[in-house]
Image: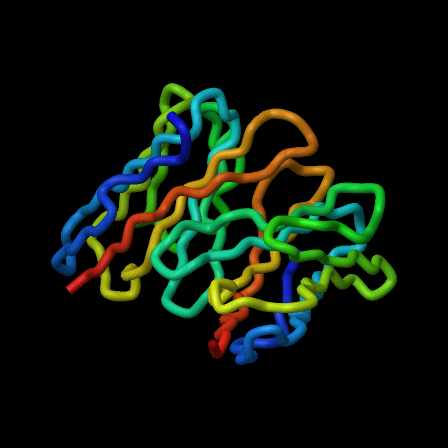
Amino acid sequence: GAGVSQSPRYKVAKRGQDVALRCDPISGHVSLFWYQQALGQGPEFLTYFQNEAQLDKSGLPSDRFFAERPEGSVSTLKIQRTQQEDSAVYLCASWGRGGDTEAFFGQGTRLTVV
Amino acid sequence: AQSVSQHNHHVILSEAASLELGCNYSYGGTVNLFWYVQYPGQHLQLLLKYFSGDPLVKGIKGFEAEFIKSKFSFNLRKPSVQWSDTAEYFCAVTVYSSASKIIFGSGTRLSIRP
């Protein structure tokens, strides 16, 4: 596609509910990132994939957070047993192969846990 | 660990005023540096980037930034701001040797008075 697509745009979950957030990166982009952006803050790194391999998951805040990219394209971020502190915008970005390039961001999924 | 500091949380200017937003990073090795902008309700967009070469980088919409290695700084400038520059601005860094996570600063909210 033309850009990074994320769905849903908005998600309201009851505390304790599981959620799944989807990211469609730019076609052919090897690298994919997930970020969490709390209100008034900068994006905080969650995890990074190169193709289907999850190379860095050091930013995942707890074992309730899980991300996958089984075929090296679409990725899903899953949050189990959501808590109020999980409320944030979840951003996905993809980055093409090559040294001199940039990451392209999706519009994000705004998760509100009530 | 690498980090990015943005000194100004909220900057308020009048139209035609000059702008400088501060950014400092902490990493002793080779870095790639970025400024992203987030207009209200929109996704993060790249303003400019520095990978190598001329430390004075020009970006879109009249923005520029200067990489000063000795000061670990990458300040964003614009000689004359417009009301349409109202947005959140994020400085970011990646470590050159690792095509992995982009680390963001906490952002600077820019408000332009018409």
Q: Quadrant of residue A105?
A: top left
Residue B26 percent coordinates (x, y): 72, 61
Q: Which residue is more in the foreground, B82 or A9?
A: B82
Q: Quadrant of residue B99?
A: top right
B26 relative to A4, above or below: below
Q: Is residue B70 above or below residue B55?
A: below
Please name the residue shown 27% across and 41% down the image: A21
Residue nearer the viewer, B111 or A53: B111
Q: In which quarter of the image is the N terminus of chain B?
A: bottom right
Relative to A40, B90 lies left or right: right
Report the residue at 27% width, 47% height from top: A79
Place of residue B29 in the rendered image (x, y in percent of width and height, measured from the top left) = 80, 49
Q: Residue at x 65, y 26 (%)?
A: A98
x and y percentages locating residue B15 in the rendered image = 56, 74
Residue under the point 48% across and 27% down: A53
From the top left corner, tell me how far across and down residue A97 is, in percent.
60, 25
